[in-house]
Amino acid sequence: MSRIALFPGSFDPFTKGHEDIVRRGLHLFDEIIVGIGRNASKQRYFPLEQMIGWIEQTFQDAPQVRVVAYDDLTANVARQLGARFLLRGLRNTTDFEYENGISQVNRFVYEEVETVFLITSPHLAPISSSIIRDLHRYGQPVDSFLPYKLKE
Ligand code: ADP
């Protein structure tokens, strides 16, 4: 049976930290589905369709990676996609506190799902989507934090 993992997140934007988690995850899973959670009550900073295109471009070399957008409970989406694993990254204890709760709730919704955590690579630990949004908003170049170019 192939090992399929869903890597859920907002990815607003998808960063080199996220790319690292996916590429390392490819040693563990046969297929990784990057799942962009849509949140009706939260306006995105980087448009969804553009982000899907940039993530697809990032993994042009890796046919085992695909991208979906969803508007549902993550655990339900994993079940629908046949993904028995959720992939998440951990940077620090704040991430841990949050992830600890949601991984338990995800197993409440879909008992067979297991969350697999990869610890951040140290050189990527300071990268967060929210910091990148702040830098970009005030005109600071952010391309060095992203695995694609914002403008072609
Ligand atoms: P969410 O909105 O669900 O927190 P994000 O898009 O911010 O989603 O992040 C998705 C996942 O990637 C989370 O598990 C987060 O901890 C992880 N992540 C984010 N940045 C990094 C990084 N620099 N290194 C490792 N993991 C990261």
Image (spheres, rainbow, N blue to C red):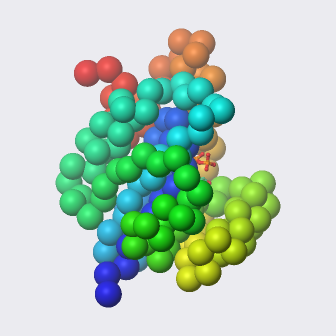
In the image, residue 86 lies at what x, y percent?
A: 52, 68
> With 28 as the anchor, is 133 left or right in this view?
right
Residue in the image at 52% along x and 35% along y: 12
Quarter occupied by residue 149: top left
> With 137 as the anchor, is 102 left or right in this view?
right
State the count of labels: 0
Residue 26 vertical placement versus 19 (above, below): below
Q: Does residue 97 appear anywhere in the picture? A: yes
Quarter occupied by residue 117: bottom right
- Nearer the observer, 52 or 142: 52
Residue 92 vertical placement versus 139 (above, below): below
- Nearer the observer, 123 or 17: 17
Q: Residue furthest bottom?
A: 1
Residue in the image at 59% along x and 27% along y: 43
- Nearer the observer, 145 or 15: 15
Residue in the image at 38% along x and 50% along y: 68
> With 61 as the anchor, is 149 left or right in this view?
right
Q: Residue furthest top?
A: 139
Residue in the image at 45% along x and 53% along y: 35
In the image, residue 52 lies at what x, y percent?
A: 35, 39
In the image, residue 15 lies at what x, y percent?
A: 47, 42
In the image, residue 105 lies at what x, y percent?
A: 71, 68
Quarter of the figure with the N terminus = bottom left
Q: Does residue 129 appear anywhere in the picture? A: no
Residue 94 vertical placement versus 107 (above, below): above
Quarter of the figure with the C terminus = top left
